[in-house]
């Protein structure tokens, strides 16, 4: 019963985080649509399904990591817990390197499969290339938030996500409206916000008593 309760809570929290992380792309879409133009809106919108595919992948991995961490944390097995967390971080790093190497040459072919207008292909590809780099932040945030949930701290991960989502909106306005960086500015804003959420999670994990 305890295991099923944990699984249900983890699934519910994961769904909330998926919704809130999708706000990154939504904020980018709205802001570039308002201040850059219709083509920019189409470019960022066309990139959305690919970004969301990465998001769902890493949320699934983080759910599994959270369950393993919860088992060792509940058993108060510090050595196994540290080993599991270390493996999660290492495997995520390897996955991110592979993602960047594989995704970069595939961006344009995948975009052509989605059949967006030719006028936005270049802009969409540029946004996606920066978003792939931001995928490192997506991966690590979800893995680390899964670890936090497994150690009984769902609240911190969710708060960090909300703070970084608000930061993304602020940086979007700065880079797009004030600095006029256009679509790349929106992508860079998201990358920075995601990196901040990772740092917040790392700091919180390091401060947990069991470690």
Image (cartoon, helix red, strand yellow):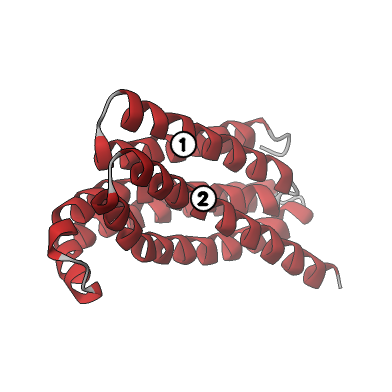
- Quarter location, residue 113: bottom left
Q: Is residue 194 above or below residue 171?
A: below
Whether residues under marks 2 and 1 lie with C-beta atoms below 8 angstroms apart, the answer is yes
Q: Residue at x 64, y 44 (%)?
A: 157
Q: Secondary structure at mark 1?
A: helix
Q: Nearer the viewer, residue 204 or 36?
A: 36
Q: Position of residue 173 (x, y in %)?
A: 41, 31
Q: Residue furthest top?
A: 178
Q: Residue at x 81, y 67 (%)?
A: 5
Q: Is residue 156 above or below residue 13?
A: above
Q: Secondary structure at mark 2?
A: helix
Q: Residue at x 68, y 46 (%)?
A: 78
Would you say residue 202 is visible in this rendering?
no
Q: Residue at x 38, y 26 (%)?
A: 174
- Which residue is labeled 2 in the image? 23
Q: Position of residue 192 (x, y in %)?
A: 39, 34
Mark earlier in primary sequence (2, 1): 2
Q: Nearer the viewer, residue 101 or 184?
A: 184
Q: Position of residue 190 (x, y in %)?
A: 40, 41
Q: Position of residue 129 (x, y in %)?
A: 23, 51
Instruction: Answer with left or right where residue 27 lies relative to residue 49.
Output: right
Crowd rating for badge 1 (residues with CA inside 10 Å; few <14, some 14–19, many 20+): many
Instruction: Answer with left or right where residue 104 lies relative to residue 41.
Output: left
Instruction: Answer with left or right where residue 147 lies relative to residue 99.
Output: right
Tell me the number on the disc at residue 168: 1
* Alpha-carbon span between mark 2 and mark 1: 9 Å
Q: Nearer the viewer, residue 54 or 62?
A: 54
Image quadrant where one finds the N terminus:
bottom right
């Amino acid at each position: 019963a305890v295991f099923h309760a944990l699984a249900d809570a983890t699934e519910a929290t994961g769904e909330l985080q998926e919704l809130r992380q999708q706000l990154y792309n939504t904020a980018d879409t709205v802001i570039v649509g308002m201040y850059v133009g219709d083509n920019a809106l189409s470019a960022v919108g066309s990139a959305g399904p690919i970004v969301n595919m990465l998001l769902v992948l890493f949320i699934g991995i983080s759910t599994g990591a959270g369950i393993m961490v919860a088992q060792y944390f509940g058993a108060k097995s510090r050595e196994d817990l540290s080993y599991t967390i270390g493996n999660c971080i290492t495997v995520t790093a390897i996955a991110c390197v592979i993602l960047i190497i594989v995704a970069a040459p595939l961006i344009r072919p995948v975009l052509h499969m989605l059949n967006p207008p030719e006028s936005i292909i270049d802009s969409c590809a540029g946004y996606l290339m920066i978003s792939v780099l931001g995928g490192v932040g997506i991966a690590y945030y979800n893995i680390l938030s899964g670890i936090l949930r497994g150690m009984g701290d769902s609240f911190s991960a969710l708060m960090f996500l909300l703070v970084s989502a608000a930061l993304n909106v602020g940086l979007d306005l700065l880079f797009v409206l004030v600095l006029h960086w256009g679509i790349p500015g929106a992508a860079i804003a998201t990358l920075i916000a995601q990196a901040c959420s990772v740092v917040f999670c790392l700091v919180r994990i390091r401060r947990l008593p069991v470690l």
